[in-house]
Amino acid sequence: MSRRRVVASASLAIAQLWGAQAFASQDTDATKFMATYNYCDAKILAGAWATSEYEAKARGGAKIIANATPILEQALTEGRKKGKKCDWVDTGFTYEDAEALSKLWGTTVEEAKTALASKLTEGYRDLAKQVVAEAHAKKAPAGDGSVKPVKPVKPVKPVKPVLKPINKPGPVAPKAPK
């Protein structure tokens, strides 16, 4: 084997090793990101940074490791301003979470799913987690009386006029001179 081939082969091996380490580093960063944030946040960051969701998770994780969370939060705000939205599948919540919320709120499961996706899109991830935890804690079955029904309002009767209509005066006679 020529010396050139040996050097090229060694260079290729080093590049492959370096590439594998770079991917391992990105995986670690993405894992760090997902420990605090969720896929919805990654989707919004990807829109702000014009990159893939995976790359957004890796860059976001690197920012967390570098203690640059304010920069990360600013990028999330920019992504929301650009109109990036999350779907139910992006939230990380389960069907059981949506079901518990629907029972608590007295809505359909689909409405609960939409509300959760909306809350995460708007950046209220901690509030969404708290509400889901409360819904599971209450385990309120539908119709248990936890939500009081509103009594129907009785129709209002028309009011009779209190004043009588004034008769129109006839022609006014001129006053006599004094």
Image (cartoon, rainbow, N blue to C red):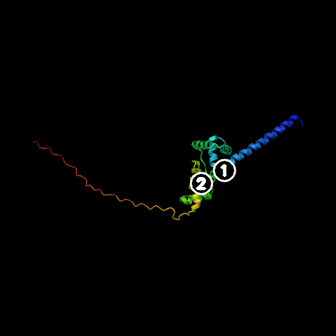
Residue at the spot x=58%, y=61% of the render? 137
Residue, disc 1:
35
Tell me the amino acid under the disc marked 2.
Lys
User: Which residue has dot 2 on it?
Assistant: 129
111 and 119: which one is in front? 119
- In the image, which disc is placed on residue 3? none
User: Could you tell me how far apart the alpha carbons at marks 2 and 1 are, in whole angstroms?
Assistant: 14 Å
The residue at the far bottom in this view is 144
Where the C terminus falls, by quadrant? top left
Pointer 2: residues within 10 angstroms few (<14), some, or many (20+)? some
Rendered location of residue 177, percent (x, y): 11, 42
For mark 2, give the secondary structure.
helix
Looking at the picture, tell me which residue is in the foreground, 8 or 106.
8
Quarter in which the N terminus is drawn: top right
Q: Secondary structure at mark 1?
A: helix
Q: In x, y percent, where is residue 47?
A: 62, 42
Left or right: residue 54 compared with residue 112: right
Q: Position of residue 27 (x, y in %)?
A: 71, 47
